[in-house]
Image: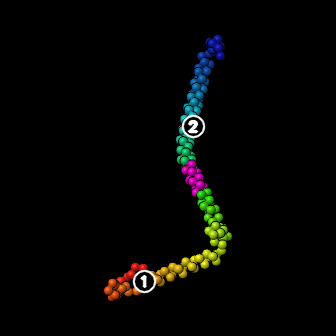
Amino acid sequence: MTEKDLAHLKRMDLLALLVEQGREAGELASALDETRAALDEANRLAQRLKDRLDEKDLQIGRLKEKLDEKDAQIERLKARLDQKDAQIGQLAAQIEDFTSGRYLEMEGIHSLTDVSGRLDLMLRMAQKAVEKYIRDIQKPSQTQGGETKEGTIQAP
């Protein structure tokens, strides 16, 4: 409405307009208060969500660190496993050499019978040496005057 239109209105109509505007202003004020309250609640909710997200981010960071540690541990274990596999391969090759007789051929021995014969010869020689040593210890030694002393050991 323009000022001319307002000037032509009666006093009662003006009062009715003022009352109507006051009522509308009150409704708008209460709507504004409700909207502000809803906005405050939304802000509080957003802050709680932000806080929870920050906590989750920290938790994710800790989990990533643990995951990195586990990844490093896995890499170390893989390296150890590779070393063990290499050792197993070497030992398997040695076993193959021993079982196939190639090892004996490398040592100049052509069969297990040769090895057995050599081992038997060494054991017989060791047995003879032990028997001779025991005989020498048990034999009474003679002194310069022809007397024998029991319990003395003559060096071989």
Residue 79 seen: yes
The type of residue carrying mark 1 is: Asp
In the image: residue 58, left or right of residue 91: left
Q: Which mark is residue 9?
A: none
Residue on which disc 1 sits:
136
Residue ID at (59%, 21%): 18
| Residue 73 painted magenta | yes
The type of residue carrying mark 2 is: Ala
**Toward the viewer: 15 or 39?**
39
Q: Residue furthest front?
A: 145
Q: Determine which quarter of the picture holds residue 4.
A: top right
- Element type where label 2 sits in the image: helix
29 w.r.t. 104: above or below:
above
139 w.r.t. 11: above or below:
below
- Element type where label 1 sits in the image: helix
Say few, some or many: other residues with alpha carbon within 10 Å of mark 1 (under 14 / 14 to 19 / 20 or more).
some
- First to last magenta residue range: 68-81
Q: Residue furthest left?
A: 145
Measuring from the top left, give residue 71's x and y in whole percent: 58, 51
**Toward the viewer: 124 or 59?**
124
Q: Determine which quarter of the picture holds residue 54.
A: top right
Residue ID at (64%, 77%): 113
| Residue 29 painted magenta | no
Measuring from the top left, give residue 15's x and y in whole percent: 59, 20
Residue on which disc 2 sits:
42
Q: Quadrant of the C terminus?
A: bottom left
Measuring from the top left, give residue 27's x and y in whole percent: 59, 29
